[in-house]
Image: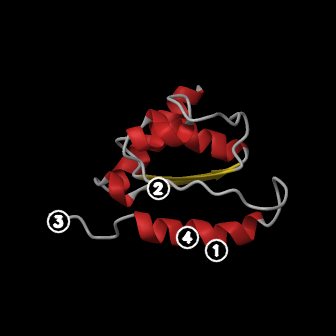
Amino acid sequence: MTAQRVTTIAVSVVLASSPNRNSRGLVGHSMGGYGASRIGMKHPNVFGSLYIMSACCLSARGAGSANPENEAAHYGITHEFTIYPGTHTSHVAVRFQENVMPFFSRTLSFELAKP
């Protein structure tokens, strides 16, 4: 199965969960952060918020159109940028608990869809 097919299946499942992109977020750390950023940017109509932690394969860049922060803003994807102290793997579970869940609580809509 190709990566494109897996992504298509995953996006289809997510779309079935809620018709509102503002009710769906995507999070990832390291390689998962890279995948979440790629999928989120390729499908801005599907995800309303992205939380990417220490994504691999993304080089730090100055402001400009190639900057992931600017791309997220361009597509109307809610995001924040924070530099945490420590290493790539320092306190990942704590960061998920203390940062990811509150981020999605602030940025996602939890209203039920109207019939």
Position of residue 66 measured from the top left corner of the image (x, y, whole percent): 55, 28
What label sits on residue 114 in the rendered view? 3
Cα–Cα span, label 1 and label 4: 7 Å
Residue 92 to residue 41: above or below: below
Residue 112 to residue 13: above or below: below
Question: Marks 1 and 4: CB-CB under 8 Å?
Answer: yes
Q: CA distance from mark 2 to mark 1?
A: 16 Å
Of callouts 2 and 1, which one flags the residue occurring earlier in the amino acid sequence?
A: 2
- Which amino acid type is marked by label 1? Glu
The residue that appears at 46% across and 71% down in the rendered structure is 105
Which amino acid does the dot numbered 3 rest on?
Answer: Lys
Query: How many circles with numbers are drawn on the protein?
Result: 4
- At label 2, the amino acid type is Gly
Q: Which of these two is toward me, 85 or 50?
A: 85
SS category of the residue bearing label 4: helix
Which structural element holds mark 3? Answer: loop
Q: Reading the chain from its start, which is encountered first: label 4 or label 2?
A: 2
> What residue do we see at 29% from left, 54% from top?
20
